[in-house]
């Protein structure tokens, strides 16, 4: 039984916390570590890219094509993992996807040529995409049991895992470890952590089966269960006007129920599309910040590379900090407020970035952008996983895959535009994107019961 509905205010968390059983608390901690593991493994690949390109002898242009292929394999993994998680449970898919990702992170280190690297990155991308969807599905299930917002903190741990991976990867390279040794240790650690964590995750297969146990119009009613003597071929109960009208009435009721189900399915599809569109816009902006923030500061303000690098540092710092606090904001003011006012803050930050001619103000703009975007994606995943259907993971995979396309498309769009306009002017693209998110933030509102 879910805890009772709680009023907004400062006592929300203290009320909910006392109702959480130890098993759920352990599951929450396990999901935290799964998110951190995903970020760690991804960072271990990224920090070793220079060593891997030297080992395989590929050009930068070829590497760019391979990274795009990695992303494409990730989308395939997302679309496959969604239906599998709905059918088998997210815990099972997390186990398989985390194992695939852990093993395949070693592949790029073992590759000695372009073909081997392409195969290795395709496997790694597939596992990473499947893990993204399945771990977010498990996170939604844990959040549903907690009955209060906790999704943003999971995403903060992903960033934390990436930070840890970058530090350990840099240390390994500083010690001149062979890339195969570094990635082998990462793979072993990933498999060991996966084996330890998976039994502690929650099983979410029972909740779907319970939804399918509801009685239908085909259940046998009391009259149909009346005893019919052996050898009797006709209905022993004489027909009556009421019984004569029973079949048409049932047919009408069945038709109405079918129409209602069709309408519900259409509404859910529109909701998934709306959430996917918001995810696309938010991740487009995040991708632009990751790939172009340093160049924008250097070109617009004519500063050195070290100063320009502070732009992404400001963005990523506030992004991580914001994800640790977004759950409390969502619990106090609701998911819609997090997306609406967060994207409005990001819009102000982008305006400041484009208008400022002073480094501290520009860095403040990128910090505002990171803070404003930090809580949006977790709210979208929570909304996608709670649409009231038995296909929560499939819905989430659709939202995630389209959002991921935005992460890839944003930097590319900016790159094309820089052939026509200055880079700072091209920042109007993410500005328009976040303003549209602000306008349609109501799409993340909880389903009406």
Image (cartoon, rainbow, N blue to C red):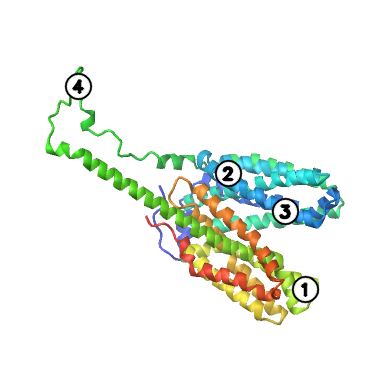
Please state if 405 lies on the left or on the right of 383 as rendered.
right
Q: Earlier in the sequence, mark 3 or mark 2?
A: 3
Q: Earlier in the sequence, mark 4 or mark 2?
A: 2
Assign the C terminus to one quadrant of the image.
bottom left
Question: Looking at the image, is 49 positioned above or below residue 425?
Answer: above
Residue situated in front as seen by the camera: 447 or 147 = 447
Q: Earlier in the sequence, mark 1 or mark 2?
A: 2
In the displayed structure image, the side of residue 322 where residue 210 appears, left or right: left
Mark pair 3, 2: CA separation: 20 Å
- Residue behind mark 4: 233
- Classify mark 4: helix, strand or loop: loop
> Residue 317 in the image: x percent, y percent?
67, 66
Badge 1: how crowded within 10 Å, few (<14), some, or many (20+)? some
Q: Residues within 10 Å of mark 3 (few under 14, many from 20)?
A: some
Residue bearing the label numbered 2 = 80
Instruction: Work out how far the residue at label 1 is from the one at label 3, CA to CA, in angstroms.
Output: 28 Å
On residue 307, the disc is 1
**Residue contact at pointers 1 and 2, CB within 8 angstroms:** no
Image location (x, y in percent) of residue 218: 30, 36
Identify which residue is drawn at 63% across, 55% down.
Answer: 157
Rendered location of residue 115, percent (x, y): 78, 44
Disc with the residue nearer the chain's start (1 vs 3): 3
Q: Position of residue 125 (x, y in %)?
A: 68, 48
Q: CA–CA distance between discs 4 and 2? A: 52 Å
Query: Which residue appears farthest toward the top when viewing the image?
Result: 231
For the point 79% across and 71% down, the residue is 306
Task: Tell me which numbered mark, 3 or 4, is placed earlier along the sequence.
Answer: 3
Work out how far the residue at label 1 is from the one at label 4, CA to CA, in angstroms: 92 Å
**Label placed on residue 67:** 3
């Amino acid at each position: 039984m879910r805890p009772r509905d709680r009023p907004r205010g400062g006592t929300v968390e203290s009320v909910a916390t006392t109702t959480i059983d130890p098993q759920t608390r352990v599951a929450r901690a396990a999901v935290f570590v799964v998110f951190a593991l995903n970020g760690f493994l991804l960072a271990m690949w990224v920090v070793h890219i220079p060593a891997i390109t030297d080992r395989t002898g590929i050009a930068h242009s070829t590497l760019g094509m391979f990274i795009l292929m990695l992303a494409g394999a990730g989308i395939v993994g997302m679309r496959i993992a969604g239906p599998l998680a709905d059918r088998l449970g997210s815990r099972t898919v997390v186990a398989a996807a985390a194992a695939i990702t852990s093993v395949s992170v070693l592949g790029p280190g073992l590759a000695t040529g372009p073909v081997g690297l392409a195969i290795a990155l395709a496997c790694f991308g597939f596992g990473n995409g499947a893990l993204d969807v399945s771990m977010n599905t498990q996170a939604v299930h844990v959040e549903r049991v907690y009955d209060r917002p906790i999704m943003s903190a999971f995403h903060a741990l992903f960033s934390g895992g990436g930070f840890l991976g970058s530090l350990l990867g840099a240390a390994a390279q500083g010690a001149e470890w062979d890339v195969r040794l570094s990635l082998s240790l990462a793979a072993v650690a990933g498999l060991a952590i996966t084996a330890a964590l998976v039994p502690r995750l929650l099983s979410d297969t029972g909740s779907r089966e319970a939804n399918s146990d509801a009685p239908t119009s085909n259940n046998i009613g009391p009259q149909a269960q009346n005893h019919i003597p052996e050898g009797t071929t006709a209905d022993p109960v004489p027909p009556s006007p009421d019984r004569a009208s029973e079949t048409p009435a049932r047919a009408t009721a069945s038709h109405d129920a079918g129409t209602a189900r069709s309408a519900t399915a259409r509404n859910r599809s529109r909701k998934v599309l709306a959430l996917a569109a918001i995810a696309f816009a938010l991740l487009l902006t995040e991708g632009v910040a990751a790939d172009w923030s340093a160049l924008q500061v250097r070109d617009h303000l004519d500063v050195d590379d070290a100063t320009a690098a502070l732009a992404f540092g400001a963005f990523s710092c506030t992004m991580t900090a914001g994800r640790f606090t977004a759950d409390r904001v969502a619990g106090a003011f609701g998911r819609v407020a997090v997306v609406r006012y967060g994207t409005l803050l990001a819009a102000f930050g982008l305006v400041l970035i484009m208008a400022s001619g002073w480094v501290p103000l520009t860095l403040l703009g990128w910090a505002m952008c990171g803070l404003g975007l930090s809580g949006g994606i977790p709210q979208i995943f929570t909304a996608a996983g709670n649409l009231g259907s038995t296909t929560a993971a499939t819905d989430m995979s659709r939202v995630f895959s389209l959002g991921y396309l935005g992460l890839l498309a944003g930097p590319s769009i900016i790159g094309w535009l820089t052939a026509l306009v200055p880079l700072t002017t091209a920042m109007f693209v993410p500005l328009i994107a976040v303003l549209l998110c602000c306008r349609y933030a109501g799409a993340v509102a909880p389903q009406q019961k």
